[in-house]
Image: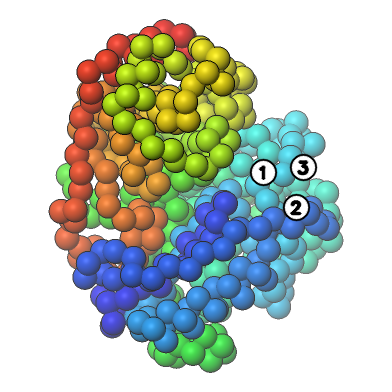
Amino acid sequence: MAATGHVAVIDIGKTNAKVALVDLAELREIDTRKRPNAVRAGPPYPHYDTDGLWAFILYALAEMHRLHGIGAITVTTHGASAALLDADGELAAPVLDYEYQGPEALIQKYDALRPDFAETGSPPLPMGLNLGAQLFWQFETFSEIRERTRTILTYPQYWAYRLTGKAVNEVTSLGCHTDLWRPRANGYSSLVERADWTALMAPVAKAADRLGPILPQIAEAASLDPQTPVYCGIHDSNASLYGHLVTREAPFAVVSTGTWVISMAIGGEVVELDPARDTLINVDARGKAVPSARFMGGREMERMTGGVTPAFGDKEIAAVFEREAMLLPSVETRSGPFQGRVHRWTVDEASLSDGARFVAVSFYLALMAATGLEMTGARGPVLVEGPFADNSAFLAMLAAVTGRPVTAVAGTGTSIGAALLTTNGEVRRSSDEDVWTGKPGMEEYARRWRELTG
């Protein structure tokens, strides 16, 4: 366990980045600093502001250490990103924004190299959501980038590298729809050899590996103890999963919410995944395959509500039931289980009160998450992490449609889970959990929604 019991977690999501200080004794965040995860337009293509993020990280670490003390540092980030290092260990090119559509220009050529879904558990995805497609497009389009690149690093491990100088890759980021990994064989996919990238891939470490102490110059810049240990780090939805892996018996499922809503089945039924519906195989921190499904639920919530949570209660829920007010898929048409469909309302949206519209959107998100759980063969209790754990309408509908207890897990799943990497699995389960069940009328509403979605 970290010397002070405080772990600083660099937590970079698609929309926002933060540094959270986690108290391991209480399994809660005691300090948090945030900033938007800005995307720069270019050149040479839209990319993340890694310089701005680094300055923010150093500032946040210095402030947290001054106020509370930091005993260890680890990292969790979104997937579908990699850093390319040159011979001097600097970025050979900016880190590409995975929502840029550039990689699609070469998709037919890339498809000739792409391994089958049966090998990788990685479905063909748009934009740069398949990391292999990103790398292929970068190297084919910008020959100078390929010439400069000496090392390919998964994104959480890029930040660990900047802290320690040690370059490694890690399986949870390699195994999240990258086309680069064989989840069941626990090794690089045939794509890596076909594309001649084998020599570029950093050695593979475990998420909980201690990479070493922080670099002296970083310790000085952030006023940290030079012996502060840094741990390898983990893909964000797998960070949410990790704390449950070490405290719960299968079967169970985790719904990790944020920009993406990821449904992950642990010890469920063996099912055949459908890559056309955004199902995939993730890889957990122990290297095991995890059937998963996803959609951009946080982005959809933002689009439909403007990020505002109005007051609502039984009156608004009753109004939604009475009018059978439903939002049907899909708000984000290029991901999720109903790709290609354009969302529609069963009633005039403008006729709904703010509270009723929020309830209907929450029900839609719960039904989308339940669809993902069903497609992955999930069984047992459902654990909801992240922002939607505070949404009572979402939780109750999810419980109703799955017919299983739904637990709202206290705290921010990604940061807490990442902090637990420093404990060698020695962790107690938090008793601060609310268990939800469905309400009258929800099962019939869910049945009708499914009927309309087909």
Q: Nearer the viewer, residue 100 or 27?
A: 27
Circles 3 and 2: CB atoms closer than 8 Å = no
Query: Where is residue 112 drawn, in percent x and y?
Result: 70, 33
Query: Where is residue 239 drawn, in percent x and y?
Result: 38, 55
Circles 2 and 1: CB atoms closer than 8 Å = yes
From this view, report whether residue 434 is shown above or below residue 70: above
Q: Which mark is residue 171?
A: none
Say which quarter of the image contains residue 322. Answer: top left
From this view, report whether residue 432 is shown above or below residue 420: above
Point 44% across, 16% down: residue: 325
User: Residue tagged by mark 1?
Assistant: 99
Helix, strand or loop at disc 3?
helix
- Mark 2 crowd level (few <14, some 14–19, many ≥20, 10 Å Cα): some
- Mark 1 crowd level (few <14, some 14–19, many ≥20, 10 Å Cα): some
- Mark 3 crowd level (few <14, some 14–19, many ≥20, 10 Å Cα): many
User: Residue tagged by mark 3?
Assistant: 102
Q: Which mark is residue 46?
A: 2
